[in-house]
Image (cartoon, helix red, strand yellow):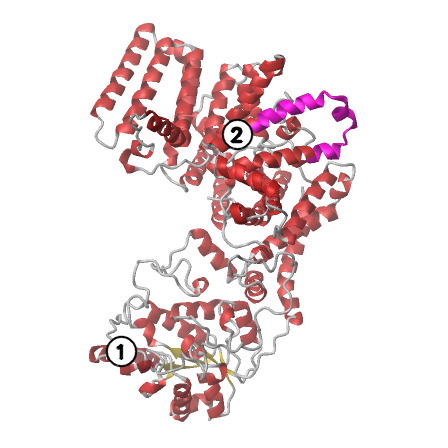
Amino acid sequence: MTQETKQPNSDSDEVPYGANAVRLSGWQWLWTLGFSLGLAWLLPVVWTEFEAFDPVPHYRMPYELSEDYWLYERWIGQLPPETIPVIGDSVVWGEYTAHNGTLSHFLSNTTGMPFANAGINGLYPLALWGLAEHHGGVLANRRVLLHCNLLWMSDPEADMQFDKEQTLNHPGLVPQFAPHVPCYRADADTRLSRALERRLEPLSWVRHLQQTYFGQKSLPEWTLADDGNHPPAYPNTYRLLPGVGGVRLSAEATSPDRGLASARHEPWSANQSGKVNMEWVTPESSRQWQAFRHLAERLQGRGNKLLVVVGPLNEHMMNEATRAKHQGFRTTVAAWLDNNRIRFVVPELLPSEEFADASHPLTKGYERLAKRLAVEPVFRTWLGQ
Amino acid sequence: MLFHTWTFLLYFIATIAGFWVLRPTRYWLHWILLSSVVFYGWWHPYYLLLVFYSTALDYFIVGWMELGPRLFRPGWRLGVSCASFVLAIIVGLVAPAGWGGLAVAVVFFAAVLAVGHWLRNRRVWLVVSIINNLSVLFFFKYAGFAIENLNTLLARLGSGQLPSAESLMPLGWEYVLPVGISFYTFQSMSYTFDFYRGAIAREPSFVRFAAFVTFFPQLVAGPIERAKNLLPQFARFPRIKWSDVTDGASLFLVGLFKKVALANYLGQYVDRVYGDVPSQGGAALALATFAFGWQIYFDFSGYTDMARGVARCMGFRLMLNFRNPYLAVSLADFWSRWHISLSTWFRDYVYIPLGGNRVGGLKLCRNLLITFVVSGLWHGAAWTFLIWGALHGLGLIANRGLEQTVWWHTRCPRLAKRFVVFGFVCFAWVFFRAESFGQAMGILQRIFTAGCSDPQMPLLLLLLVVSIWAYQFVYESPLRRWLEKPPVKVMLAVAMVLWMLMFAPRGAEPFIYFQF
């Protein structure tokens, strides 16, 4: 300030470029973009050669990796053609059960055909549609079993009818711009980021690295992360790369929250008595039902042989009015599937003690459901048996 | 709208498209103005009122400076003055509840304008411009601070309290600091100053002048451009060369990397340490201060690089604002490398009018101290900024003294000088970053007394900063030609792109200098 130096940008002078040497010419930009894009697209491919991923029998996506859509795509992509993916939300994934206590596991056991648990925890029809649209391209020209969980239409809030902001699971899978989802509030930049991430593989691969190896953080954030204790310790301060470990990809870690030995694995009636009233939305106004229709059409449009399993919901906990509305909605669903030549099964209600809550069966319930499906003529025809 | 967001990318594509399509017409200038209005209004539409006021004021004042004596006869001047004053008083008196603050402001500004009309003197118009611009700046930036301190004083004297600045806002509008107010106010004022001094001609087109003040790349955080440099560039559609686009993209890439990969990372460490001072050791506080020095450099120079890059892609050249300041060998050298547009602004419009270097001894020290204290206050309304400025002023005085010793001037190695200057700058940053004077003193005390427990600064972060510092050393050495070799440049650019793609955290952190 005190040096009365010549103005750097007086009329006679060229304005100085900068204070570093990274001043690229057109050709150098082409090289830079070529290398960068090439590496960005090559790295995920090369990575699959280095990262061991041999799923155990009856594999399902680990809970911690529920938002790792790159891994999901990789896994679905390496399923043998004869394996039948079972697609759906936490009912298919098995919220209360171990990985060998889910619908796909019992279907495999009952029918002798290979079924794969392609459900993801925390999904709902709107997100399922996004998953199939953006990360389910490999779901084509094969048998696919799709579960329809009507619970999402049983309540205006679950159906995302309200304007009030909701914290959504899988926000990256919901429509970012159209159709408009009023309860999904994110600024334009976040929406654009999410829309790009699901279209560009390198970005979803980066998310995979973060989810799997960096505790769902970026590398810089990971080096700064504390251990959650007070006073905190910072275990990654002097590490430049994660050590061996992270989340197990090929198998699920035993969880105290799931499986026969879990305290959560008990009938709904153990914690709740009395019937509940559910408001239900109309099929015409339902966002989730509309999304489900898009999903089914998309899967069918890809040449899949689709079978939809509608429910079952836990009618034992519904009062009379709710049950009637449920059955009315279910009839509409069945009619639409029928009109669109999509095979479907509406299974019988399971016993009360085989439900953990309004929609999730317990292990016994899944086993019974699989056995009932296996004897359904539509199911057998679809399976080619 | 932040440069490092997807929203900006879309906005920029639309802006460039319109700019290009309109190039054969004279509306490309209107398009730039409209784009800048959208860019600035994105934060808060009511900010636009202030930037428009500041722009219109200086545009008309310079017009009155030049044309005033010819426009009005003495009788008319008196009439206009009286009418303005009476109108102002009427507005003030009949203002409904909630409009009191605005009415007072209108009365004040109209009265000042009326006096200016009456006296029709260039110097008076200059004073009118200064009073108006600084009043707006003072109200939004310093009123809260001033009222708080005055109320403390009044409370000690047992007197009544002044109303809060918030209560003076009309229509229940929120009292918030408009983004970049210090930048565009200073830019607009520099036009008036330069015209007054005869350095530039009056700009007849309001649209061109408004485009100059509000030009979106540099509107919210500089560089604070001079009319002499930027205004002529709006005279005709710029001749955009291919090299402008590649240079602009290069500048943007480096700026983006500085912000997204470095500043935000450093900021997280600094926030962690400065957010819990009592439980930190001396080494952690010292390293966090070191980290803050680099954080603010990467943050601000990153913004400037991006601003210059965006402007360059459109064929406009903004001034260089940072030149590797942490390689400075003296404080004077530091200020010729750090926030150059602001330091030259203060040099030209405060330091030199005070007498500059041409006076000797105590007056020189006074000039330096005043200039730096004002510069400190420009950054914000807090005692810590004032002390930061004063420290730099005193440091500069001491540095000048030191430069006059033979040992420092000829024997002390340049590297040692660089580290001394860097150390002093970091010491002053403590006051800049601290939330209060007490916290700053506490930090300084703990740095020397709280022991050397593990600072827990990520190794990766340290390696990044040291690598970039080393790069700067090489860049300013004879080895620079190695950095200018095409494979090295391409390799660095690819590394930056991949780093941002793979490791940058999601989400856009705002820039530190937006608060100024």
According to the image, label 1 marks what residue? A326
Q: Residue under mark 2: which chain is it in?
A: B
Quarter assignment of residue B56: top left
In this view, the mark in front (2 or 1): 2
Residue A302 or residue B74, whichever sits in front = B74
Identity of the amino acid at label 2? Ile
Instruction: Give the position of the N terminus of chain A as an image quadrant.
Output: top right
Residue B404 or residue B107, whichever sits in front = B404
According to the image, label 2 marks what residue? B387
Numbered mark located on residue A170 in the image: none
Location of residue A76 in the rendering, given as x and y in whole percent from the top left corner: 54, 76
SS majority, magenta: helix
Residue drawn at 57 percent across, 73 percent down: A249
Is A85 included in the stretch rendered in magenta? no
The reply to whether discs 2 and 1 touch (Cβ–Cβ < 8 Å) is no
Location of residue B362 in the rendering, given as x and y in whole percent from the top left corner: 60, 14
Location of residue B202 in the rendering, given as x and y in whole percent from the top left corner: 48, 18
Mark 1 lies on a secondary structure that is helix
Q: Which residues are magenta?
A: B391-419
Circles 2 and 1 on the same chain: no
Residue B9 or residue A219, whichever sits in front = A219
How many numbered marks appear? Answer: 2
Identity of the amino acid at label 1? His
In the rendered structure, the answer to whether residue B287 lies left or right of residue B170 reads right
Mark 2 lies on a secondary structure that is helix
* Above or below for B118 versus B403: above
